[in-house]
Amino acid sequence: MALSKIDGTNLITGLPAGSVVQAVTFTYSTQESTSSTSFVASSVTASITPSSSSNKVLVMVSGTQTTSNNLSHNVATIYRGSSTNLGDSNYGISYAYSGAGSTHSGISMNVLDSPSTTSATSYTMYFRATAAHSQTLQNGGAKSTIVLLEIAGWL
């Protein structure tokens, strides 16, 4: 195994498929809200520069969310860049429903992505409201975390 540098970062090269090549993490604790029924970007975002275009990126996001009313949904997803939704276009990746009262739920999303690039690639948690109900992330001072792991790829 050789040690190389990309953008000043030490990376181990020559690892077998499935090995973690590098890790990036970001934690955000400021509350954010939306009443938009379309997905909007949160501040929970991180960027990684894959060392090989055949490598994968495991994206893991955790946090909390709250809706304001009865019969509402908590919906969140992960975007690569600002245009590629890695989840369902309507239901996202994290989806919870409330029949009565406001809903408080955890967010736990994991996606193994194939960005097929060696350029800096950003991943961001997006969230949306349903109907006229507002959606809040990090309610009550909770934190959201995004972790990016570059995984040595398979040919």
Image: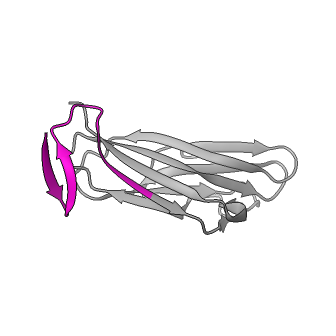
Task: Report the predominant secondary structure element of the magenta stretch.
Answer: strand
Q: Camera-side residue: 4 or 80?
A: 4
Quadrant of the snapshot with the C terminus? top left
Q: Is residue 142 above or below residue 94?
A: below
Magenta segment: does it hold 59?
no
Q: Camera-side residue: 152 or 36?
A: 152
Magenta segment: does it hold 13?
yes
Residue at (52% x, 55% y) in the render: 145
Residue 133 falls left or right of residue 87: right
Answer whether residue 91 is visible to the viewer in this image. no
Residue at (44% x, 51% y) in the render: 147
Residue 141 falls left or right of residue 19: right
Answer whether residue 128 is visible to the viewer in this image. yes
Residue 108 falls left or right of residue 55: right
Residue 120, given in percent of the width and then of the height, sits at 28, 59
Residue 137, given in percent of the width and then of the height, sits at 65, 60
Residue range corresponding to the magenta coloring: 1-25
Quarter of the image where one finds residue 1: top left
Residue at (88% x, 47% y) in the render: 100
